[in-house]
């Protein structure tokens, strides 16, 4: 798989968290851990997850992945 720079921005009313990495799996794993931590605090659950990467197919996979995990009732 081609390596490309990836950036995922998780934002809400009072915060913004930026995850940057060189591989799709690196940013996905880190962002998922952050989303799990945020989910523990009802008042700061993210409003948006934005994905920026040069690889269109990887961006689509990440979007589908985050769409699936953000609607799960529990990330445990």
Image: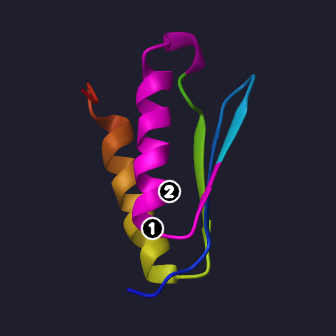
Residue 14, image x, y percentages: 75, 22
- Res 60 label: none
Height in image: 7 above or below 17?
below
Is the N terminus in the top left, top right, bottom left or bottom right quadrant? Answer: bottom left
Task: Say which residue label 1 marks.
Answer: 24
Answer with left or right where residue 48 lies relative to residue 29. Answer: right
Instruction: Look at the image and give the residue range highlighted in magenta.
Output: 19-44
Q: CA distance from mark 1 to mark 2?
A: 6 Å
Q: Within 10 Å of the Cα at label 2, are there few (<14), some (14-19), or many (20+) other Cα atoms? A: many
Residue at point 50% right, 34% down?
34
Q: Magenta span: helix, strand or loop, mainly?
A: helix
Is residue 29 rendered to the left or right of residue 10? Answer: left
Q: Is residue 6 magenta?
A: no
Specify few, some or many for label 1: CA neighbours under 10 Å numbering under 14, 14-19, or 20 or more: many
* Relative horizontal placement of residue 30, taking residue 47 as reference (left or right): left
Give the SS element for disc 1.
helix
Instruction: Decide: is 28 above or below 12.
Output: below
Marks 1 and 2 close (CB-CB < 8 Å): yes
Where is residue 53? Give x, y as percent. 60, 73
- Which picture quadrant has residue 24? bottom left
Q: Residue at x 43, y 81 (%)?
A: 57
Relative to residue 5, is residue 9 depicted above or below? above
Mark 2 lies on residue: 27
> Which residue is at 45% across, 87% downward?
2
Q: Position of residue 61 (x, y in %)?
A: 37, 68
Residue 76 or residue 66, whichever sits in front: 76
Q: Residue at x 24, y 26 (%)?
A: 76
- Kind of element beneath mark 2: helix
């Amino acid at each position: 798989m081609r390596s490309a720079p990836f950036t995922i921005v998780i934002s809400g009313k009072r915060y913004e968290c930026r995850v940057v990495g060189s591989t799709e799996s690196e940013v996905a794993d880190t962002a998922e851990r952050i989303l799990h931590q945020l989910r523990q605090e009802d008042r700061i659950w993210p409003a948006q997850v934005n994905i920026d990467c040069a690889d269109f197919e990887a961006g689509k996979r990440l979007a589908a992945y985050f769409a699936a995990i953000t609607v799960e009732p529990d990330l445990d």
